[in-house]
Image: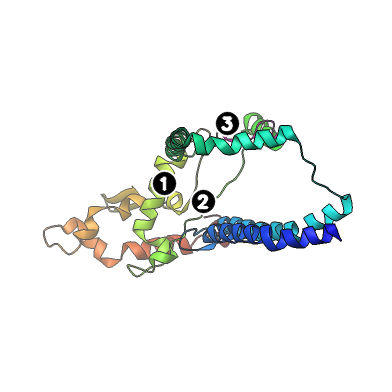
Amino acid sequence: HISLTATVRAVLTTGHAIFLSALTTIIGFSVLRWPSLVPIEPMRTVGTTLVLGIAITFVMSMVLVPALVQLLRYRKTRSKAFDKMWEFIGEIPVKSTVIVLLVTLSLTLYGASILEEELGKGISGASDEVPPGLESYETLREYSDVFDGGQTNMFIVDATQRGAQNGTAPIRDLPILDAIDIMQIEKIDQVANTTTISLVTILKSIHVDVVIGDLELYDESLWEILHDECWDESTNPLRPDCWAYSATSKEYMVNVSFDTLSPEVRSML
């Protein structure tokens, strides 16, 4: 009877504090489910996991802990040593308020400086970013070194929010392709032992060679032609060398190049 009374009293008093603490934490982590803040769906699953985990932890605290207390016949025993220790700990923030605030502020600023430094680092994929002793990573590293192979990863470029512009699909629009090219050259390809392939790589590999008689009109890759200044001068009467560009468009050339690829190749781009 005494144990039951104590359990009910704890739930009615401390239980309120535990509930409010769990509720505020759930609200805080629930923002990870907002698509506007976390556009990547796999990352939003982290928010779902945290919210469900905290909710289940609260339920287990209110149901399982009293059951364990009753089962194990737990009784609180007083200890002068522990009482003095907790009394000393409780006096620290009261008697040394300024020191506690200064230490907390110093640790916060130090953590912010480390965070800024870490966020400024680029993608490296180096071994120092992998947990030590990870057997699967060591196997892949050995495979890459011995057989000149590696592990395939994928970056998904989603341009749907940009919407259709210039009369073509968002992912096929030239500004998006230029952004992909910059990401490949300036970011990913700078990582040691890393190569990339995308639709831009296909456009760069397509060679256009047009010869009429003894006159060579084009001897460039399709990617270079797409960035030729003649597209803006195709109607200029003073630029006869650019008149041929008025017969088509950059968007049409990208669509033809993409649509002629096999479904297997397109699935990898």
Q: Which one is nearer the viewer's eye here, 13 or 124?
A: 13
**Answer yes or no: do the residues labelled 2 and 1 have beta carbons within 8 Å?**
yes
Q: Is residue 141 left or right of residue 62?
A: left
Q: Residue at x 17, y 64 (%)?
A: 235
Cα separation, mark 2 vs mark 1, equals 10 Å
- The residue wearing badge 2 is 155
- 10 Å crowding of disc 1: few (<14), some (14-19), many (20+): few
Q: Nearer the viewer, mark 1 or mark 3?
A: 3
Query: Vertically, is 263 above or below 167?
Result: above
**Is residue 222 visible in the rendered structure shown here?**
no
Which element carries disc 1, helix, strand or loop?
Answer: helix
Q: Which residues are magenta?
A: 127-135
Identify the amino acid type marked 2. Answer: Phe
Q: Which label's residue is closer to the chain start, 2 or 1?
A: 2
Q: Which label's residue is closer to the chain start, 3 or 2?
A: 3
Query: Vertically, is 86 above or below 3?
Result: above
Which element carries disc 3, helix, strand or loop?
Answer: helix
Q: Residue at x 44, y 65 (%)?
A: 160
- 10 Å crowding of disc 3: few (<14), some (14-19), many (20+): few
- The residue wearing badge 3 is 128
Query: Vertically, is 66 above or below 91?
Result: below
Q: Which label's residue is closer to the chain start, 1 or 3?
A: 3
Q: Which mark is residue 183?
A: 1
Q: Which mark is residue 162?
A: none
Q: Residue at x 24, y 61 (%)?
A: 244
Q: Is residue 210 left or right of residue 243?
A: right
Q: Which one is nearer the viewer's eye here, 60 or 135?
A: 60
Cα separation, mark 1 vs mark 3, equals 23 Å
Q: Nearer the viewer, mark 3 or mark 2?
A: 3
